[in-house]
Amino acid sequence: MERLSKAEKKSEALKKINEVDLLTFGPGTLTAQGQSLVHEIIKSRADNLSTIIVSQKTMR
């Protein structure tokens, strides 16, 4: 996320991300910019690429 947020050309960085067959996201705190980037990544991968998002939120 840090490298993507610092990338000068986000479209090229997203293209590289979309070359990966399976993308996983782990737990962590995201800034508003990070949340926007995750949304953009998920949206761009939604039709034909696999993405796994993992959370470690405590069940009550």
Image (cartoon, helix red, strand yellow):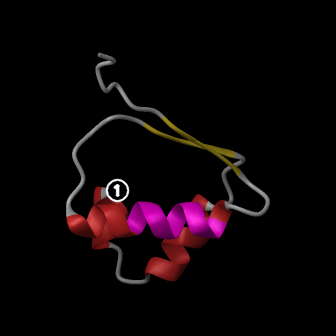
Q: Secondary structure at mark 1?
A: loop
The quarter of the picture where the C terminus appears is: top left
Q: Residue at x 46, y 33 (%)?
A: 54
Residue 4 inside the magenta-drawn segment: no
Q: Is residue 48 left or right of residue 20?
A: right
Count every numbered label the image shows and give the total. Answer: 1
Depicted 41 relative to depicted 27: above or below: below
Task: Report the residue marked by disc 1.
Answer: 1
In the rendered image of this protein, does residue 4 appear above or below residue 7? above
Q: Which range is magenta?
A: 37-44
Question: What's under tag 1, amino acid-wise?
Answer: Met
Could you tell whether 24 is left or right of 2 in the image? right
Residue located at (26% from left, 39% from top)? 28
Percent of width and height locating residue 57: 31, 26
Residue at the far top: name it: 60
Task: Decide which of 11, 36 is in the foreground and name it.
Answer: 36
| Magenta segment, prevailing SS (helix, strand or loop) | helix
* Quadrant of the rendering where the N terminus is positioned: bottom left
Q: Is residue 5 left or right of residue 38?
A: left
Which image quarter: residue 48?
bottom right
Q: Quadrant of residue 46?
A: bottom right
For disc 1, the neighbor class at 10 Å (few under 14, some 14 to 19, many from 20) is few
Rendered location of residue 8, percent (x, y) = 35, 82
Residue farthest to the front, as pictured: 60
